[in-house]
Image (cartoon, helix red, strand yellow):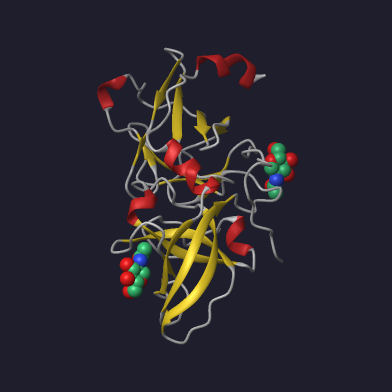
């Protein structure tokens, strides 16, 4: 019902990099893989509590993505298939696997992955983005440093990384965009732009995926540093794009 009423009010404007991020699902990129062994910690701030469902799949490991393909931090939480071609340096074996992006590799080039697992060496690889194995789980949220005058919101456990977020303003009935932070969150940045404050809860948002799905959710309250559930929504599976199989 909500979707029917408000869908037409969402602007058709595409976030920057939507096309480039979709191309990560439809194209293979050649690069190198190395190892740096830090686990789920990292710039995307996925850890520590309630890891996304993809992190529970045995075939998926945390990794840092090269800076050019992180697009600021938009592709934090993306899943990619990694195919090793040949060992260039070192002895650590590398098999076909899937990675979950938790961090940035500052010195990597496009196509490169720095695996957050232990190892030493350098492999020639290719990567291609795949839908995360969310199964029946829903998108969840985390606020940081937020209160009724400012929000900084992380969107977690989504099948695709979100490329655009809009927040509904209940009095003016407008949808206003949230700005992407460099550490994996969406925030109110331009205070003068018409955001209604104090911010009323629940908060209604729209989220767009790189394959141009738009979904809506309602976040019940502002609580910092804990993972919160919305109404139970998720991006739909797209049969034209690859997916990671979930392995128990
Ligand atoms: C991969 O590593 C090789 C050997 O160090 C280097 O010559 C090449 O530029 C690297 N390519 C990428 C895409 O990182
Ligand atoms: C996801 O949300 C739906 C709809 O609210 C709910 O029925 C389902 O149990 C949720 N899934 C999980 C794994 O919590």
In the displayed structure, 229 sits above or below 220; it is below
Residue 19 is situated, as x and y percent measured from the top left of the image, at 45, 37
- Which residue is pictured at 41% across the width and 73% down the height? 34
Seen in the picture, residue 77 relative to 152 is either above or below; the reply is below
Residue drawn at (51%, 38%) of the image: 210
Q: Quadrant of the N terminus?
A: top right
Is 158 left, or right, of 18 in this rendering? right
Residue 104: image location, x then y, percent: 36, 59
Q: Do we see residue 226 in this rendering?
A: yes
Q: Quadrant of ligand 1?
A: bottom left
Residue extending farthest to the top is 172
- Position of residue 36 relative to residue 42, above or below, is below
Q: Residue at x 57, y 32 (%)?
A: 213
Seen in the image, is 248 located left or right of residue 30? right
* Marker count (numbered): 0
Query: Viewed as shown, does residue 95 lie left or right of 111?
Result: right
**In terms of image quadrants, where is residue 143?**
top left
- Where residue 239 sits, quadrant-wise, is top right
Q: From where the camera sits, is residue 39 visible?
A: no
Where the C terminus falls, by quadrant?
A: bottom right
């Amino acid at each position: 019902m909500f979707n029917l009423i408000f869908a037409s009010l969402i602007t058709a404007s595409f976030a920057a990099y939507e096309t480039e991020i979709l191309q990560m699902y439809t194209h293979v990129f050649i690069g190198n893989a190395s190892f740096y062994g830090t686990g789920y910690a990292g710039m995307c701030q996925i850890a520590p509590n309630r890891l996304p469902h993809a992190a529970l799949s045995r075939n998926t490991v945390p990794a840092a993505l090269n800076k050019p393909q992180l697009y600021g931090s938009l592709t934090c939480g993306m899943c990619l298939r990694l195919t090793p071609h040949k060992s260039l340096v070192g002895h650590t074996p590398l098999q076909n696997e899937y990675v979950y992006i938790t961090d940035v590799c500052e010195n990597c080039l496009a196509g490169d992955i720095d695996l957050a697992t232990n190892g030493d060496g350098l492999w020639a690889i290719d990567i291609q983005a795949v839908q995360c194995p969310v199964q029946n789980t829903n998108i969840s949220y985390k606020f940081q440093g937020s209160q009724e005058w400012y929000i900084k919101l992380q969107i977690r456990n989504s099948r695709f990384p979100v490329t655009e977020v809009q927040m509904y303003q209940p009095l003016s009935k407008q949808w206003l965009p949230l700005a992407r932070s460099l550490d994996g969150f969406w925030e109110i940045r331009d205070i003068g732009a018409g955001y209604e404050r104090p911010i009323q809860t629940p908060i209604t948002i729209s989220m767009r995926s790189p394959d141009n799905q738009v979904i809506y959710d309602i976040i019940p309250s502002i609580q910092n540093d804990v993972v919160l559930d919305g109404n139970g929504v998720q991006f739909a599976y797209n049969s034209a794009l690859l997916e990671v199989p979930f392995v128990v």
